Image (cartoon, rainbow, N blue to C red):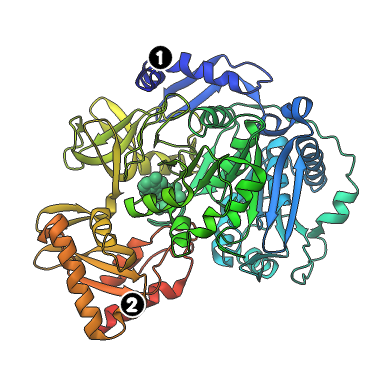
Amino acid sequence: MSYADFHRRSITDRDAFWAEQATLIDWHRPFTQVCDYSNPPFAKWFVGGQTNLCHNAVDRHVATRGAQNALIWVSTEVDKEVVYSFAELHAEVQRTAAMLLELGVKAGDRVLIYMPMIPEAVFAMLACTRIGALHSVVFGGFASVSLASRIDDAEPTVIVSADAGSRGGKVVAYKPLLDEAIRLAKHKPAKVLLVDRGLSPMERVAGRDVDYAPLRDRHMAAQVPCTWVESTHPSYTLYTSGTTGKPKGVQRDTGGYAVALAASMKHIFLGAPGETYFSTSDIGWVVGHSYIVYGPLIAGMATILYEGLPIRPDAGIWWSLVEKYKVTSMFSAPTAVRVLKKQDPAYLQKYDLSSLKALFLAGEPLDEPTAKWIAEAIGRPIVDNYWQTETGWPILTICNGVEPAPSKFGSPGKPVYGYDVKLIDENTGQELTGANQKGVVAIEGPLPPGCMQTVWRDDARFVNTYWKSIPGRLVYSTFDWGIRDEDGYFFILGRTDDVINVAGHRLGTREIEESISSHPAVAEVAVVGVADPLKGQVAMAFAVLKDPSKAATPADALKLEGEIMKTVDEQLGAVARPARVRFVTVLPKTRSGKLLRRAIQAVCEGRDPGDLTTIEDPSALQQVKDLIAQR
Ligand code: ATP
Ligand code: MG
């Protein structure tokens, strides 16, 4: 079947299409209705069906592939490598489930997981879904205030944590941060389960804190059957990255999510049972949930859990794992590729990467120079994919598993099956149907299986934040701005609040950033719109140079600034020329690697930068502040 037909059928014959995909997972009780959209925008998938995520990820593989690799843990931080077969994973998850039960966790309870990238974190996630409890994974190393707000939102019965994480060989103690967060939070967990890695001394709170190892010892032979839950039973909550403001708590279901992931492994990620998947993300992000833990395991694949940096001991580390474990599908982010790009590609080329069907990238716009560099460095196909924490799996990509098709540089591809993607004119609210028209990327309801059910405990926020009516229907807004070319490929131009209006011309910050990045001296750049009394808004650019000494003196900086402006003039026209191009050594980003443009913009306009709980390096914003103060 052609991809166009496959996609069309997913929209026009929705229920039959998804009923077929639903056969990719095990059901304890069959569903009676594929999709209940009687109360839009809330969609219920596979109504009446009962299943379990952990069963689909682990138990169902034990009989057929029990001895095969399931979880491969590699830590370059503590120099350890441990491989768990499906049978071993099954045993560990049952032990952890028994531990959680003993600590009082019941179906429907929340368990907050604040952990480094260690196997126990994966056991804990799977143990939760096994017993019908919801996990809420909080990125390890988040500061106490961010953690406290998530504790109050999730109100967990139990928190699972560890003494410490490690980053670049430096121990990051978690326990003091956790203790402080619990002190700050209004809600107090009944128990805190602690993995002691021997990295950092821990003080235990009597009556509350429980050590993982001795408790596990008492449950070595644990047999905890999966709790069958309704397809619509929530499996977890997870926060968005906080790039545009306060993070939103996304609530996911069980059956729809399992089906969506199983289908995506086949149609998008080219995965098959017995193969190996390597996602370089973190379990604290949606990519970690969908494509480190659940997706690969549901597909009967081994998954690599990697603790460490991409360039330590050297830039060959990830690629050595591809060779060693014959990785077939790999998933990373442009931000990680930009880190590698500063290294010699010879490191990547030392290894046999022929097992790799493709490298999938998501999370941020994949600019052409970055895409070309990594494609040449590894000599394997690169597939961009565009999605959000909210959707849980790709919205736009090339579904090479359905019908192989070429990618276009700068485009994540076409609408994925199940997604009825529209472009909406921001001013009129009407759908744009022609080619090369710019609009807001939106999805007509119902959202396909696997997408968010609601905002955790806040249905009103879900409806009011995301859903808009266009004549006769409801659409979900992605808050990203895009364009569709004559071949149906989409291009993401940036976030809707990153659109700049210069003297009546609407410009995407991404267009200007791409133009500036094409200057050979520039490694990375952020462009924001700043209020201007004459023009409405002007573009301001903050660039990181490949070689900072190129702007060492004010005269050098001014010369380079002029050159970069000329590049933009030539490529986009003078209207897009930034008012200033300033040089910094690092850009403010979220811990998931996204540019915090709204914070830069606020600083430029002398406003409060807002919620910065997910910022990676606060000194990066200080550099911008200092430059603005000098003006
Ligand atoms: P918040 O919603 O809290 O402001 P966030 O949007 O950064 O944070 P995520 O869900 O982690 O949180 O990121 C999704 C966003 O990332 C998308 O809406 C889009 O802006 C961007 N994005 C993801 N993948 C791509 C891609 N392949 N190309 C372009 N942009 C992408
Ligand atoms: Mg978002």
Residue 504 % position (x, y): 10, 54
Q: Is residue 157 visible?
A: no
**In-front residue for pair 197/68:** 68
Circle 2 crowding by C-alpha within 10 Å: few under 14, some 14–19, many from 20: some
**Left or right: 368 with respect to 36?**
left
105 versus 114 height, above or below: above
Q: On the image, numbered disc 2 is attached to which residue? A: 625
Residue 195 % position (x, y): 77, 58
Q: On the image, numbered disc 1 is attached to which residue? A: 13
> Which of the 4 image quarters holds residue 595?
bottom left
Name which residue type carries label 1.
Answer: Asp
**In-front residue for pair 147/440:** 440
**Left or right: 264 with respect to 487?**
right
Name which residue type carries label 2.
Answer: Lys
Residue 508 % position (x, y): 23, 52
> Which of the 4 image quarters holds residue 230?
top right
